[in-house]
Image (cartoon, rainbow, N blue to C red):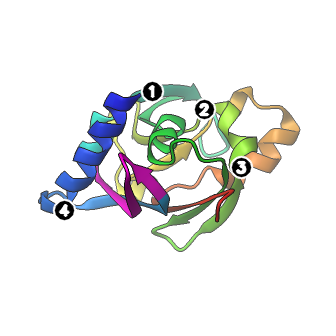
């Protein structure tokens, strides 16, 4: 875990020098190696360098199964907010959509910050560059109705509220 935390700090620093555009900002009270941070910004390349995972699922926006690849949101937040009790995520999308998410309710489903669908990078026109993806078809009908709005596409910013805030 410490290796991943150091990698994230390097990626955060590198992001300020990168020519690639920032596609995701995460804000909250982060402490890494004794340094306090309020904002972490990531380019697509930086997110792709983090531990990733895939979800194959069907959802209301498609009639067939698709495979989504992206950063493991649980691992990313665990490293940025090490030792803190995460309560709520506030997701904000490029299209103006925003939603508050109970992290304890969502975390068990291993959400992915997906950047590709079936091996193709998602453009802004195609719900990208990031889409918070869940294994939607494996959720119960009640969970599907409740979690549907958590699957924010065109995701741009995540504000994290912890027990200390």
Element type where label 3 sits in the image: helix
Q: Contact, CB < 8 Å: mark 1 with mark 2?
A: yes
Q: Quadrant of the C terminus?
A: bottom right
The residues bearing labels 4 and 1 have C-alpha atoms spaced at a distance of 26 Å
> Whole-Å distance between the Cαs marked 3 and 2?
15 Å
Dot 4 crowding, Cα within 10 Å, few <14, some 14–19, many 20+: some
Residue 119 seen in the figure: no
Residue 159: % across, % down? 54, 63
Read off the residue under disc 2.
Answer: 110
Q: Secondary structure at mark 1?
A: strand
Specify which label sits upstream in the sequence, 3 or 2. 2
Callout 3: few (<14), some (14-19), or many (20+) C-alpha neighbours within 10 Å? some
Query: CB under 8 Å between callouts 4 and 1?
Result: no
Labelled pair 1, 3 in contact (Cβ < 8 Å)? no
Residue 133 visible from this viewpoint: yes
In this picture, residue 89 sits left or right of residue 116: right
Magenta-drawn stretch, dominant element (helix, strand or loop): strand
Q: Which residues are magenta?
A: 30-44
Q: Name the residue carrying label 1.
A: 53
Residue at 39% across / 61% down in the picture?
A: 37
Figure check: 54 above or below 156: above
Q: CA distance from mark 1 to mark 2?
A: 9 Å
As helix, strand or loop, the secondary structure at mark 4 comes to helix
Identify the residue position indicated by label 3 in the image: 148
Label pair 4/3, CB-CB below 8 angstroms: no
The disc, 4 or 1, on the residue closer to the chain's N-terminal end is 4
Image mark for residue 16: 4
Tell me: residue 99, above or below residue 67. below
Q: Position of residue 153 (x, y in %)?
A: 52, 55
Dot 1 crowding, Cα within 10 Å, few <14, some 14–19, many 20+: some
Q: CA distance from mark 4 to mark 3?
A: 34 Å
Vertical comparison of 21 with 59: above or below: below
């Amino acid at each position: 875990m410490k290796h991943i935390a150091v990698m994230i700090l390097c990626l955060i620093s590198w992001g300020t020098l990168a020519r690639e555009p920032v596609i995701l900002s995460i804000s909250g009270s982060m402490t890494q190696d004794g340094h306090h941070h309020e904002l972490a910004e990531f380019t697509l390349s930086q997110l792709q360098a983090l531990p990733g995972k895939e979800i194959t699922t069907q959802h209301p926006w498609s009639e067939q199964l698709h495979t989504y690849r992206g950063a493991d949101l649980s691992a990313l937040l665990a490293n940025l907010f090490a030792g803190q009790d995460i309560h709520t995520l506030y997701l904000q999308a490029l299209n103006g959509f925003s939603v508050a998410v109970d992290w304890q309710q969502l975390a068990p489903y291993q959400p992915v910050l997906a950047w590709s669908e079936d091996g193709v990078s998602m453009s802004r026109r195609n719900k990208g560059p990031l889409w918070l993806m869940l294994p939607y078809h494996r959720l119960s009908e009640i969970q599907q109705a409740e979690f549907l709005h958590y699957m924010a596409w065109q995701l741009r910013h995540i504000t994290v509220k912890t027990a200390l805030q």
